[in-house]
Image: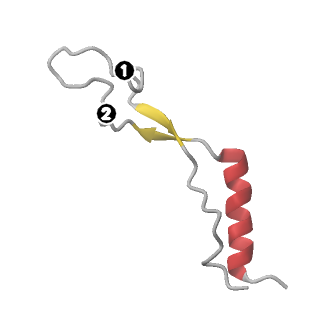
Amino acid sequence: MSTWLERKEERRREAAKYHGVKMEVCAACSGSGYYDNTGSPACGSCGGSGRMRGRPNVSCDTQHVAV
């Protein structure tokens, strides 16, 4: 029988596999899409959308899981 933490970790990894890439606020423009508010061009890092694709928060270590 597996513990609750083991099942939770398994569910988290399964969800990360199917829904792993998440949109995050762009760090260069802070989500506005522009570098500043005085007529500057669109952000080159995110393409003016204000969002960037982030890496999934998946930890491969199982130090939190009691075995």
Amino acid type indicated by mark 2: Ala
Using the numbered discs, state the Cα–Cα distance from disc 1 to disc 2 in whole angstroms: 9 Å
Q: Residue at x 85, y 85 (%)?
A: 1
Name the residue furthest right.
1
Q: Residue at x 68, y 78 (%)?
A: 5
Q: In terms of image quadrants, where is residue 21?
A: top right
Q: Residue furthest left?
A: 38
Quadrant the C terminus occupies? bottom right
**Helix, strand, or loop for circle 2?**
loop
Label 2 sits on residue: 28
Mark 1 belongs to which amino acid?
Gly
C-beta proximity under 8 Å, tags 1 and 2:
yes
52 lies left or right of 27: right
Q: In the rendering, at what x and y percent does residue 44 appear?
A: 36, 20
Residue in the picture at 34% in, 38% down: 27
The image shows residue 57, relative to residue 38, as above or below, that is below
- Label 1 sits on residue: 44
Element carrying mark 1: loop
Work out whether mark 1 precedes mark 2 in sequence or the reverse, and give the earlier one. Answer: 2
Q: Position of residue 25 (x, y in %)?
A: 39, 39
Which residue corresponds to the image point at 55% horizontal and 45% vertical from the top-left? 55
Of the numbered discs in the image, which one, if any, rests on residue 24? none
**Where residue 40 sits in the image (x, y, percent)?**
21, 16
